[in-house]
Amino acid sequence: MNARSGASASGDGEAATVMQERVGGTLEQIASARGERPRSEPPPRPLYPYIDGMRAIAVLAVVVFHAAPDFLRGGYSGVDVFFVISGFIVSASLHDYRWSGARRFLAFFYARRLRRIAPALLAMLVTTFFFIVLFVPYGQISGSFREVSLAACFGLSNLVLAYKADYFSNAGEMNPFTHTWSLAVEEQFYLIFPLLFALMRSRLRPHVIVTALLGLALVSFGSAFDFGKGGFAANFYSSTARFWEIGLGVALYFFLVMRGEFDMRSREPERFAATYAGAGLVGLGFVTSHSDAFPVPGALLPVAGALLIIVGLHGRAPNSPIGRALSSAPMITIGAASYSLYLWHWPVLVIFRWTTGLTTLSSKLAALAIGFSLAAFSYSYIERPLRYGALLSGPRRAIGLSLAGCVATAAAIGALYLATPSISLSVVSRHSADWFPNYNDEKGPDARGCFVSTTKKKSGGETINIVTRAGCDGPATAQTLHIVGDSHSWAYMTMAELYALRTGVRVVRRDFNGCPLLATIYFSLECPIYWKEVAQALAAETKPGDVIFLPALRTLRMRNQLGADLEPSFPDITAFMAQLHSLDLARETLRVLTKPGVAIVVEAPKPLFKTASLRCADWFDRGNPVCSYGDTVSRAEEEAHRRPVMAFLADLQREFPTVTLWDPMPLLCESTECRIYRDGRPLFFDGDHLSGYGGRVLLPAFAEEMAQRGLPPLPEAADSR
């Protein structure tokens, strides 16, 4: 959380740098004249001790929320306190700067920001990615983890996260780089800060400048409502929707300057009313904030509270218990290291979630102990030495080496990603062809020289994969197999590719997460639009002899794949489907899809497990509480659970003669129990999606079903491997 980017920016070391800009001379000469330490050493104490106290309270609230959200439900609003502090301190640290040209100012400003932000951030990113490669399954690394970490190298992770992981979702809490969103917001704010600095140093009347600053903050505040129409995640992570928080800190700085109150040094007593009111609002935000209200209007409480605390304490003697506590040595110590603490605590918590688990008090205390230790090391040996040392002294060197470090870190992350199958400790990563449907090593060429050619295209939120056989003279067919559904369509990718390779049938696979055709359970408001568009597209594309295969998750999961707890008890699925008007929606879809000579094959529900297998496949995660339910479920329990859906599908079969049902359950459950593993290899890669190996197991039976619908059979020599 780069709100701490001003953590020591107002210290004596920065003051010396500013004086050098004003009067010239070496840092050593300035330090000698003022009796201060040279620039290469950290400042002996903060200039505004209460600021470090505010940082300490804010970062501890965030840490407590991340480790035990039920204990402090609004602790994440500590981020908003940091945003205010950052706007105020970044402005305050330039208070004595004498304008000497735009180019020189930009070099000075960005060199300081990069010295502050880059070293600890880049060290955290590459170290965390290394440990993620060791302990987290390959598919997660290749997806959002890699994208977010690379974006974080360049201050763009909030833009990636807005489309990848809701901050408050299981996907967000399992991503070790989710916390970098706030750094990105601040880094993007720094792109416009020089304009605000120029405004504050302009010849305009002070009241006009304050009004302009407040007006810009109001525009940002209003934009948060507009962004909310595009979805919560985009709203929460949006830099535009967050600038008002940092901007109000800037406006408060200038307001105090305008009133002649910024340069006071404990000449006046603390404003008790402002301090107590501010602390009350911040505390209220910590305990009452609700995720649905962020950033507006929810952030108003912590933002207003932080502003009031600054008004109450800036340049004044801390006489109240709150003021003295914020200016105390322990708070100053924690606040000074708050940037490193924020950076390092979160990845440690996430790695615990992926491995041993983070549900017991002992596991949380162990994770926090490691996180605090890493933060202390980072602060002492990375953050302070590189910020105040000679290596990054001078604007040109600081900017050049910092940017080179960003590129080098991104390259290191890329290299670690490519090396994952070789260095990972996870069997899931080392044998990804068995686990992940889109990581198979059997695309060819086969004995005939045939190989699979797959092309992809995006259409809205839908992914379309066109799979064909190439490179050989095997008999081709004009027929097409269309596989359409939610993520369970994706899970058939290995089977689809091998089917196309061995039969020559063209396979077109569409998937839209959470939106299966013939939906029987939860779906989003955009799903009906998707169903209509896809049904019309299929009706236009299909021709006699084609087959449409509709796989999907049609029963309620036993657990969220990334969650720590089982899903709540199942409702009456029959009533649930009636409430969703599932039968009417399915009829509407099938009326569009039904064409002479086009067969429609619907997948019956597969087994559902209480354990997500990819989270419990290795020696270091089998003790995780999420693995305590084992890798088997009762066949009778599964049959009972899916019975309402089977009756629903039977009704559709009777009404639409071209619809047939293909049931993989008997193939996946060979006895009275359904098992995740067969012969030591996974049939499922989580709690319900087929694995790559599971697709190979189903291939012969699936091909036989397709042959009955008029598609070519598998060659006799083919095997499922």
Image (tube, rainbow, N blue to C red):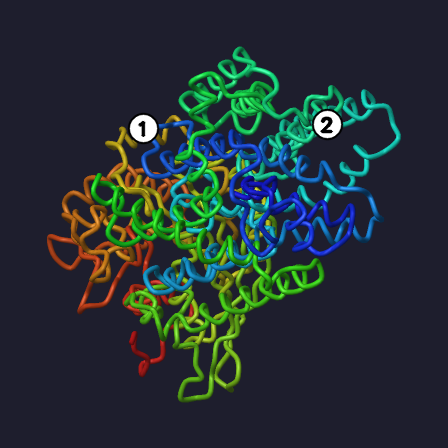
Mark 2: give few (<14), some (14-19) or many (20+) Cα within 10 Å. many
Q: Secondary structure at mark 1?
A: loop
| Residue 165 visible in rendering | yes
* Labelled disc at residue 254: 2
Identify which residue is drawn at 52% across, 32% down.
49
| Residue 592 visible in rendering | no
Identify which residue is drawn at 50% across, 76% down.
469
Q: Earlier in the sequence, mark 1 or mark 2?
A: 1
Outermost residue toward the right? 203
Relative image position of residue 653 (x, y in whole percent): 36, 44
Residue type at the position of mark 1: Phe
Relative image position of residue 239 (x, y in whole percent): 63, 39
Q: Secondary structure at mark 2?
A: helix
Tell me: 521 left or right of 50. Answer: left
Mark 1: give few (<14), some (14-19) or many (20+) Cα within 10 Å. few
Tell me: 69 left or right of 262. Answer: left
Q: Quadrant of residue 399?
A: bottom right
Identify which residue is drawn at 35% across, 42% down.
654
Foreground of the two, 193 or 512: 193
Residue type at the position of mark 2: Phe
Name the residue tied to disc 1: 71
